[in-house]
Image (cartoon, rainbow, N blue to C red):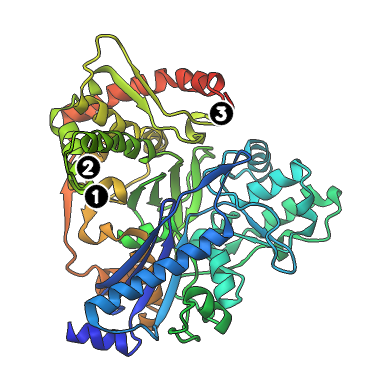
């Protein structure tokens, strides 16, 4: 405790802050080994406005400031030390999306998050033009869809970026982005570590008839790899982060990253043949490839690790939102009944009931947790849905197991494609909210993917901790030291974790569940068509 107090007081601790879908979290660590010293958080929610999933910009800064203030408070309470200096900082956030600005720095259109499924036309046209999968979530898809929609703001765009890139820009003045996050904006050339120039040329030629004064290469942030200098905290940026004025400026910042990249770091899965699954509001699997996939697959994103290795990413928009909503129903009942249960107790009670008493195929109970559209299954919109046959075994265990199973339904369809491509995975690691109740989400995932799943003790900290580790790599790496070596020898040396193998009977049950899941997708589509939001 004394050593940590001294470390913080001397300004040698490192901070990582990540803006997730429902929570912004900051983690303070010892950069020598990644030990968590303190944390802070702030809850927030996206909103659907005029058909667009968005967050207001003032909510971004309110959340960042509140998170940092909460972390400062936690540090003061634990160590009796006020944070005035830091060795390094890193910011990460939800990947993809669209934030566009003019020359004065004015936001030209509402922030469009990864959750939107508005870019079907642009996604299809760019994928065909590039012969490279461009998902609807990607920033370039949003830009081109704005062009197709003849949106007036496009002519004034001077810079567009992701949420992490925006925060970093405002704090440092640098228009840069970590390569992993940049890979969700525009295709990356793994040889050069930057955007594919041949595809930039094709895009410029495509939009030339519109007569815009800009060229794409001048709108994109500069790409940086993990460990590269990404600028320092300016005086203006310091006031944005810590309005109290306690924090000094001039602190180095790591390249801003996406939550996919920080998840890979948090699970030590940046080396080839490793993979991780991040399961929270959305869910994505990241598999580091030995070589590029042979064929184009619309269900698979081609992105990179924070140090530029090729990654196959399977992303699904929906994971735990409806699952959490069902837990909320039982929480409300408990309160009405006068029963006091903490959130952790309630989740453990329901999750373990599902795992231990539920049928592997959920006894004929089928749910879809589609709060929003789902590209993998061809849904432009989503409607959370419960279906069952009259003779289904409808009980709490099967209801909750169905919600756990369906949270992995879309991702399972994408992972099946990788299996057909003979992608080798030596180790699959899980992290995120689905794994918070010990053993349950891990077991369901092992059976869903028919693959052993590891959960590390550090995975509970997730992306914010992974971003803090990337900031530590910026200042602690030795000459020529690679990111995988840094993680293996300094951060994860001796790290503990648990491994759960798939169970043959449960794998068979999940496969049966998936047969119902795919067969009933027309019902989900019909629900979207019949239950309009304005009714």
Which disc, if any, is residue 41? none
The residue carrying mark 1 is 436
The residue carrying mark 3 is 533
* Whole-percent x, y for residue 441 in the image: 24, 42
* Whole-percent x, y for residue 261 in the image: 42, 59
Q: Residue at x 73, y 63 (%)?
A: 102
Which disc, if any, is residue 347? 2
Is residue 270 visible in the rendered structure shown here? no
Is residue 358 visible in the rendered structure shown here? yes
Q: Residue at x 35, y 49 (%)?
A: 278
Classify 10 Å Cα crowding around label 1: few (below 14), some (14-19), many (20 and above): some
- Determine whether label 3 and label 1 are within 8 Å by CB: no
- Determine whether label 1 and label 2 are within 8 Å by CB: yes
Classify 10 Å Cα crowding around label 3: few (below 14), some (14-19), many (20 and above): few
Front residue of this view, candidates 502 and 153: 153
Above or below for 480 versus 448: below
Quick one: label 3 or label 1, which is nearer the N terminus?
Answer: 1
* Whole-percent x, y for residue 308 in the image: 48, 63
Classify residue 262 as left or right of residue 298: left
Mark in front: 1 vs 2:
2
Split into 4 quadrants, where in the image is the N terminus?
A: bottom left
Q: Residue at x 73, y 51 (%)?
A: 202
- Which of the 4 image quarters holds residue 405? top left
Mark in front: 3 vs 1:
3
Quick one: label 1 or label 2, which is nearer the N terminus?
Answer: 2
* Whole-percent x, y for residue 209 in the image: 86, 48
């Amino acid at each position: 405790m004394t050593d940590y107090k001294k470390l913080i007081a001397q300004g040698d601790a490192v901070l990582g802050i990540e803006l997730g879908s429902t929570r912004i979290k900051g983690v303070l660590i010892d950069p020598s080994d990644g030990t968590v010293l303190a944390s802070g958080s702030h809850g927030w929610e996206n909103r659907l406005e005029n058909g667009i999933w968005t967050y207001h910009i003032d909510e971004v800064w309110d959340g960042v400031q509140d998170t940092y203030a909460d972390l400062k408070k936690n540090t003061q309470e634990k160590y009796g030390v006020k944070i005035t200096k830091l060795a390094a900082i890193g910011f990460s956030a939800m990947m993809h999306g669209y934030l566009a600005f003019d020359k004065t720095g004015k936001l030209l259109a509402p922030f469009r998050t990864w959750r939107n499924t508005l870019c079907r036309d642009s996604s299809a046209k760019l994928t065909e033009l590039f012969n490279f999968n461009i998902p609807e979530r990607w920033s370039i898809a949003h830009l081109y869809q704005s062009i197709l929609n003849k949106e007036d703001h496009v002519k004034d765009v001077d810079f567009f970026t992701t949420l992490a890139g925006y925060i970093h820009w405002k704090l440092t003045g640098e228009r840069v982005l970590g390569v992993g996050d940049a890979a969700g904006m525009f295709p990356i050339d793994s040889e050069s570590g930057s955007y594919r120039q041949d595809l930039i040329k094709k895009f410029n030629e495509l939009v030339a008839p519109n007569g815009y004064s800009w060229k794409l290469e001048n709108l994109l942030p500069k790409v940086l790899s993990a460990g590269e200098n990404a600028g320092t905290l300016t005086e203006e940026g310091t006031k944005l982060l810590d309005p109290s004025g306690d924090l000094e400026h001039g602190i180095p910042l790591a390249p801003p990253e996406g939550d996919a990249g920080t998840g890979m770091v948090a699970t030590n899965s940046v080396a080839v043949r490793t993979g991780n699954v991040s399961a929270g509001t959305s869910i994505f699997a990241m598999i580091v490839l030995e070589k590029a996939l042979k064929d184009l697959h619309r269900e698979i994103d081609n992105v990179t690790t924070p140090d530029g290795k090729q990654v196959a990413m399977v992303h699904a928009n929906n994971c735990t939102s409806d699952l959490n909503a069902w837990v909320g129903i039982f929480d409300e009942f408990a309160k009405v009944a006068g029963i006091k249960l903490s959130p952790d107790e309630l989740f453990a009670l329901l999750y373990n009931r599902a795992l231990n008493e539920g049928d592997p195929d959920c006894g004929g109970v089928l749910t879809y947790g589609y709060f929003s559209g789902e590209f993998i299954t061809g849904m432009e919109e989503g409607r959370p849905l419960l279906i069952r046959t009259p003779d289904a075994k409808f009980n709490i265990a099967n209801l909750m197991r169905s919600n756990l199973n369906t949270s992995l339904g879309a991702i399972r369809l994408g992972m099946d494609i990788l299996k057909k491509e003979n992608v080798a995975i030596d180790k699959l690691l899980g992290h995120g909210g689905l794994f918070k109740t010990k053993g349950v989400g891990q077991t369901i995932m092992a059976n869903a993917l028919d693959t052993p799943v590891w959960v590390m003790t550090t995975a509970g900290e997730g992306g914010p901790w992974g971003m803090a580790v990337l900031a530590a790599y910026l200042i602690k790496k030795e000459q020529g030291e690679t990111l995988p070596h840094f993680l293996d020898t300094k951060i994860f040396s001796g790290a503990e974790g648990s491994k759960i193998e798939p169970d043959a009977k449960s794998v068979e049950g999940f496969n049966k569940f998936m047969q119902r899941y795919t067969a009933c997708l027309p019902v989900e589509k019909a629900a979207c068509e019949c239950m309009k939001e304005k009714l």
